[in-house]
């Protein structure tokens, strides 16, 4: 230790930290980049092309090779190489300069989409990953799951029809459920509808929707609309969105006015000395959380009141079935209630 | 024919499943729950609970109020810790008197009377017996005070309200409010704190509570902190303030531990643990007068004795190892001396020394024997007079005499500060590691929980040492 010098030791340590940071920082570190390039092989590229073509074909958009380079982050050379391989293998054919999926290509694309959406469903039901992460993780996993594994996954999840964003999951025979909806941004004032789909791409807009606590399957009513904003009421709350954000939410219009429940609100809005009847749990309350709430007695028809407010504001203790149960705000907002006017009980 | 029918039925069932839609599992389960609650409503009658309910809500209003909630909580925790630390001194002293000062020499005499060879006598009595006796003397009294008090509070129904009050803070770092309780339990004993995480029923939050429990300064480490703070921190300020300064230093270390607990909870919940399932609910049971004697009995049996038994099982071989490394020679150096010299360089870099590092390695089984081991090794390494003999752990009644030995071993204020930090930030004791393995049933999380704090300790002591030397 003859050459020891504290400043030098400290600097050496900092240098080491910086090197480690650049090696291992999430998603951009050298370690991850190396792993990524290893994985972005021909299979991934082919499957990404198939998915892109499938989605565009569904909306009657013809794509040529140039469009591929604009939409996918692979180099021109790799794309052209793989497109010709795909044509050779009869996954694609050319119509003029537009690329079209063959029967085989269509089937393949559906399998990838099935794997993607099933994995998102799995993440939402059986793990604790944040909503923002589901899409990115499924983007990687869809290339890794074999057909058998996908079927096992579907069986494990009880053969779900829709993924957590409301997108239909194709069955193993390629059947796709169909939902008719309109973008929220195109609805007229006073339209009543139900949110059936929340798009998870681009991520910036998806995060805004999540931050607003807008939930799938909520009933909404448009109250105001102009070029700069759309205002709607849902579950006793008022939401204001920019049209570009609202465009990523799909709503199915409810014609039958009998079904409309304007008095439904969220448990999180219940105040001290108020009581309410539970209407049900929101679709966004999933997996273990949902079962736990049911176990505790938060079921349709149960009466609930506020027992204790918290000195820090969250969580709140609710009185249900004679027991005080504390729930956090984000849980209470996923329990739908109808307030009981003092004294008289509504059915 | 038969087969055709089967195929037809399967196809039909698939079609029906498709038509019935996605939610039928949920709706079925929910309607069963709803039906069950209706049946209960119609058939179960409850006695009048209004009056007890009113008292409950009055207590609740006070313990969760904005003004009284937090001061009350700090006050109660402070009283419990004070009773534990101060109250345990007397029985600890008596036990030490009995087991170390009276029984140990008696055993030695007995051994020489029956003509036991020196190595067997040293191995068994100076090694194994001494370590076990030490652990019992230091560990038993505080646990026998802390656990019953804690269990009484739990039975009364106060602790769930603490979790309720604190949840918002813990939520910010991705943890569960009940972690406030397991953390406090950790102040008594980390192994017991880890067992207590069973009250957290969400897998992710429970793992966080288990892994970060070691950042609660446990009973085995309080005496180390108090001793070092008294000797070194108290000496820096004028003598009128010295007890205040050393007290603040000890509390500062405990608070630093809480800070690390929050920091690592936050970091873990956002990295390695983010995929684990996370739920939340917290039941606030009605208050009830605790069944005093039953509580005392069960807390002594369930918590104190089980933890103590595990500690003894781990301490016995540690005592043997400590004696052996000091008495087995390679060439003309004992293993202990050789290890101290090879660890000295790394120890210096961390502002510690080889003796401290070796003591923490051999004393993994119990934090209680760290100071006796350090003293024994220091005497052996420096060759100053004092101590009880090679490989025999000892502690001195006089603080000044202890200070003299440590200073002769080359200790400075920096060494003391860094040993205090390292005592907070190092691997859990082997009892806790074993308990973590039993509770998580996973080698992976056991390794994370064991390695994470010691790495944090290396980094922190290293940084403190370098900055200290640059500034000084």
Image (cartoon, coloured by chain):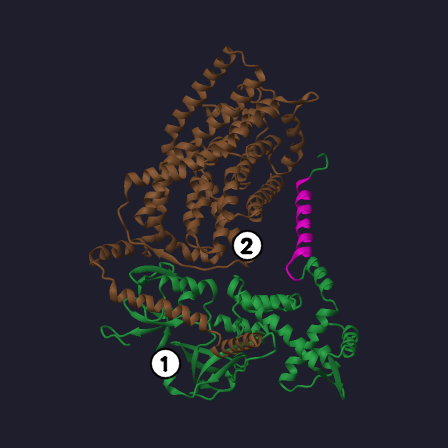
Chain letter matching colour brown: B
For residue A115, what is the image quadrant?
bottom right
Does A59 appear above or below B232? below
The answer to whether A276 appears left or right of A83 in the picture is left
Residue located 64% across and 35% down the image: B348
Is B219 left or right of B407, judged from the image as shown?
A: left
Instruction: Determine the image quadrant of residue A199.
Output: bottom right
With respect to residue B128, does A298 lie above or below? below
Who's green, chain-wise? A
Front-lying residue, B233 or B203: B203
Residue A313 in view in this figure = no
Q: Main secondary structure of the magenta part?
A: helix
Crowding at dot 1, Cα within 10 Å, few <14 / some 14-19 / many 20+, comes out as: some
Region in magenta: A5-27
Q: Nearer the viewer, residue B241 or A86?
A: A86
Secondary structure found at label 1: loop
Question: Which residue is at a point 50% across and 10% down the rendered structure image?
Answer: B113
Q: Is residue A95 visible?
A: yes
Q: Which residue is mark 2?
A: B267
């Amino acid at each position: 230790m003859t050459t020891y010098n504290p400043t030098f030791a400290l600097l050496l340590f900092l240098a080491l930290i910086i090197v480690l940071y650049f090696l291992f920082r999430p998603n951009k570190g050298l370690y991850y980049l190396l792993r990524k390039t290893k994985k972005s092989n021909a299979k991934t590229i082919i499957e990404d092309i198939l998915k892109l073509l499938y989605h565009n074909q569904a909306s009657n958009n013809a794509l040529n090779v140039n469009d591929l380079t604009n939409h996918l982050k692979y180099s021109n050379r790799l794309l052209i190489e793989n497109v010709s391989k795909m044509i050779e293998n009869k996954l694609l054919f050319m119509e003029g300069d537009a690329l079209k999926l063959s029967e085989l290509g269509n089937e393949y694309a559906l399998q990838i989409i099935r794997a993607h959406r099933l994995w998102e469903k799995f993440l939402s039901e059986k793990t604790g990953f944040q909503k923002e992460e589901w899409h990115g993780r499924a983007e990687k996993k869809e290339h890794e799951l074999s057909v058998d594994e996908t079927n096992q996954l579907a069986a494990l999840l009880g053969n779900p029809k829709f993924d957590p964003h409301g997108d239909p999951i194709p069955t193993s025979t390629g059947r796709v459920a169909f939902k008719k909806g309109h973008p929220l941004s195109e609805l007229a004032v006073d339209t009543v509808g139900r949110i059936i789909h929340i798009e998870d791409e681009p991520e910036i807009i998806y995060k805004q929707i999540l931050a607003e606590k807008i939930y799938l399957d909520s009933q909404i009513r448009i109250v105001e609309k102009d070029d700069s904003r759309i205002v709607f009421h849902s579950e006793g709350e008022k939401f204001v969105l920019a049209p570009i954000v609202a465009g990523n939410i799909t709503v199915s219009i409810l014609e039958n006015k009998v079904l409309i429940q304007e008095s439904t609100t969220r448990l999180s809005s219940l105040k001290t000395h108020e009581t309410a009847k539970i209407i049900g749990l929101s679709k966004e309350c999933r997996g273990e959380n949902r079962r736990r709430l049911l176990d505790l007695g938060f079921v349709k028809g149960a009466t609930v009141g506020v027992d204790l407010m918290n000195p820090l504001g969250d969580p709140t203790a609710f009185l249900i079935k004679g027991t005080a149960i504390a729930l956090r705000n984000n849980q209470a907002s996923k329990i739908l209630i109808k307030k009981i006017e003092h004294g008289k009980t509504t059915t | 024919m038969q087969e055709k029918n089967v195929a037809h039925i399967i196809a039909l069932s698939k079609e029906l499943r498709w038509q019935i839609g996605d939610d039928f599992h949920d709706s079925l389960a929910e309607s069963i729950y709803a039906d069950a609650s209706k049946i209960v409503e119609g058939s179960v009658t409850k006695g009048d609970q209004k009056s007890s309910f009113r008292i409950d809500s009055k207590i609740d209003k006070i313990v969760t109020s904005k003004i009284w909630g937090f001061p009350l909580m700090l006050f109660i925790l402070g009283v419990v810790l004070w009773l534990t630390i101060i109250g345990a001194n007397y029985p600890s002293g008596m036990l030490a008197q009995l087991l170390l000062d009276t029984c140990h020499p008696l055993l030695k005499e007995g051994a020489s009377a029956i003509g036991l060879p020196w190595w067997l006598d040293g191995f068994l009595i100076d090694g194994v017996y001494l370590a076990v006796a030490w652990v019992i003397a230091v560990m038993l009294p505080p646990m026998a005070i802390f656990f019953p008090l804690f269990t009484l509070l739990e039975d009364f129904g106060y602790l769930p309200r603490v979790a309720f009050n604190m949840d918002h803070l813990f939520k910010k770092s991705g943890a569960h409010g009940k972690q406030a309780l397991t953390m406090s339990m950790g102040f008594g004993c980390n192994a017991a704190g880890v067992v207590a995480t069973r009250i957290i029923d969400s897998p992710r939050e429970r793992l966080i509570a288990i892994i970060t429990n070691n950042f609660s300064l446990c009973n085995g480490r309080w005496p180390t902190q108090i001793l070092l703070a008294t000797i070194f921190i108290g000496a820096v300020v004028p003598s009128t303030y010295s007890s205040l300064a050393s007290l603040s230093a000890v509390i500062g270390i405990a608070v630093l531990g809480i800070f690390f607990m929050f920091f690592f909870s936050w970091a873990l919940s956002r990295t390695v643990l983010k995929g684990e399932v996370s739920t939340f609910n917290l039941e606030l049971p009605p208050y009830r007068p605790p069944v005093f004697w039953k509580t005392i009995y069960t807390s002594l049996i369930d918590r104190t004795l089980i933890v103590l038994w595990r500690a003894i099982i781990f301490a016995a071989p540690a005592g043997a190892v400590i004696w052996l490394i000091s008495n087995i020679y390679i060439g003309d150096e004992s293993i202990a001396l050789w290890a101290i010299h090879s660890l000295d360089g790394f120890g210096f870099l961390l502002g510690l020394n080889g003796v401290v590092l070796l003591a923490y390695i051999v004393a993994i089984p119990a934090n209680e024997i760290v100071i006796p081991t350090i003293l024994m090794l220091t005497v052996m390494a420096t060759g100053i007079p004092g101590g009880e003999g090679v490989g025999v752990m000892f502690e001195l009644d006089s603080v000044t005499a202890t200070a003299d030995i440590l200073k002769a071993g080359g200790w400075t204020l920096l060494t003391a500060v860094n040993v205090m930090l390292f005592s907070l930030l190092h691997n859990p004791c082997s009892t806790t590691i074993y308990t973590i393995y039993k509770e998580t049933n996973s080698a992976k999380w056991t390794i994370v929980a064991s390695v994470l704090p010691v790495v944090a300790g290396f980094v922190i002591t290293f940084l403190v040492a370098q900055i200290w030397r640059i500034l000084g």
